[in-house]
Image (cartoon, rainbow, N blue to C red):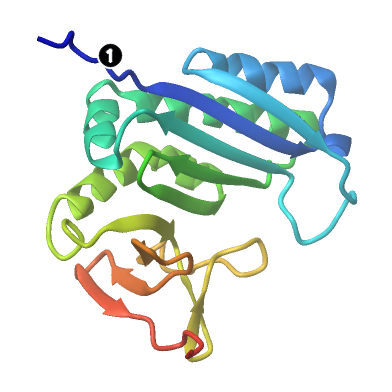
Amino acid sequence: MLPPGPIMKTAIIFSVEYRQSGYTAAEEQQLRGLLEGLGAVRLRAHRLPAAGGSTELWLVASFIGGSMASGLIGHITTNLYDRLSEQLLAFFRIREQRDGLKPEMTLTVSYDDVDLALGPVSEHEVSRLPKLARRVHEVLSAPPLRDSGVTRIVIGMVRDGDGWAEPHLQNQPEDSGRFWGISLSGHRQITHIFDSETNLLAARTDLPQG
């Protein structure tokens, strides 16, 4: 009889990239300290213009070794999203106390099989992170997305003329992120739009043909 295989354990890694000119060494250590209680942290500074269309901080929370279906329910049960929300809100307060401005942050949550992109996030949206995690779990556990092979979810798709665009600093949703962009297995781009209020899934009609 073969010996049992290794037990898969989930590792949590926070990858943080930020505008070097906007952060002091003390703030870098404060951010590291806030996140290290939840997982490993990698900080990477970038030399970027002092102003422009890009955000100042990009945060990816990677849960390695687990699917989103199982990982979400486990992390919801252990209040991980509540703790992550609390730590990020603490960082918002640190930044606001320094210069009266809130950080321009993008947030992505990544499991082995699905990436969840929240785009630019405000303090309000960070506070709603536990509720959003529960909603995403509900959606992925029921039709029409349960067996559709979702690989990427973009919260807060924005109507752009007759089509759709992913949210960014200059173009953010006015409907509290009602519409989600969905990528199915085998596709890199957003192929479907999901209405999180009506649970309707529709193929995008604004994709280039060919």
Residue bearing the label numbered 1: 6
The quadrant in which residue 44 appears is top right
* Residue at (24, 27) in percent of width and height: 74
Looking at this rendering, what residue extends furthest in the left direction? 1
Q: Residue at x 54, y 42 (%)?
A: 123
Q: Nearer the viewer, residue 88 or 163?
A: 163
Give the number of marks.
Answer: 1
Image quadrant holding the N terminus, namely top left
Vertical relation: 180 (above or below) 71: below
Instruction: Say which residue appears at 35% left-offset and 73% top-offset.
Output: 193
In x, y percent, where is residue 50? 89, 49
Name the foreground residue: 32 vs 191: 191
Q: Residues within 10 Å of mark 1 (few under 14, many from 20)?
A: few
Measured as percent of width and height from the top left, residue 17 is found at 70, 37
Residue farthest to the front, as pictured: 1
139 versus 168 height, above or below: above
Q: Position of residue 181 (x, y in %)?
A: 40, 66
Query: Residue 102's quadrant in the figure?
Result: top right
Q: Against 122, is 170 above or below?
A: below
In the visual, does 165 lie left or right of 48?
Answer: left
Q: Amino acid at mark 1?
A: Pro
144 vs 177, nearest the viewer: 144
